[in-house]
Amino acid sequence: QVQLVESGGGLVQAGGSLRLSCVASGSTLSWNPMAWFRQAPGKEREFVGGIRGSGSNTRYADYVKGRFTISRDNAKNTVYLQMNSLKPEDTAVYYCGASRLTIPIIPTSPTSYDYWGRGTQVTVSS
């Protein structure tokens, strides 16, 4: 059974940086798209960024483009989210998702992802 574990969240001042990690176990996901989503209190889970299995393509939501970078190390079964120039509106629980399909696209809907971690809290103070 696939398990995803996120880490790296915390409290940071506006303008600061954090690096999130998502380690997958139970299966090799080297060819499966993976993505980061976030959910703030009272809001729906929203797409942040995703990466194809090969790592050759990435996709970002407009509100993080230019500030966040997603990458993956398939040898370590790990996906990263480097977050720079953080803003208070980035405050949320960040979740890692993985598709069970080896598809050559990066879906933006959370319903397209089959495996989820428990999330890591990111809080940005003003």
Image (cartoon, helix red, strand yellow):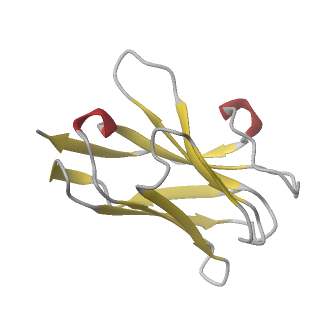
In the rendered image, the quadrant that contains the C terminus is top left
x and y percentages locating residue 75 in the rendered image: 65, 84
84 w.r.t. 117: above or below: below
The residue lying furthest to the top in this view is 42
x and y percentages locating residue 71 in the rendered image: 57, 69
Q: 102 or 67, which is in the foreground? A: 67
Does the image show residue 118? no
Does the image show residue 80? yes
Residue at screen point 72% across, 41% down: 113
111 w.r.t. 117: above or below: above
x and y percentages locating residue 22 in the rendered image: 51, 62
| Count of number-bearing discs | 0
Relative to 45, 109 lies left or right: right
Q: 60 or 29, which is in the foreground? A: 60
Relative to 89, 116 lies left or right: right
125 w.r.t. 82: above or below: above
x and y percentages locating residue 11 in the rendered image: 17, 50
Relative to 84, 5 lies left or right: right
Residue at screen point 59% across, 80% down: 76
In the rendered image, the quadrant that contains the N terminus is bottom right
Residue at screen point 74% across, 56% down: 33
The residue lying furthest to the bottom in this view is 75
Residue at screen point 76% across, 71% down: 30
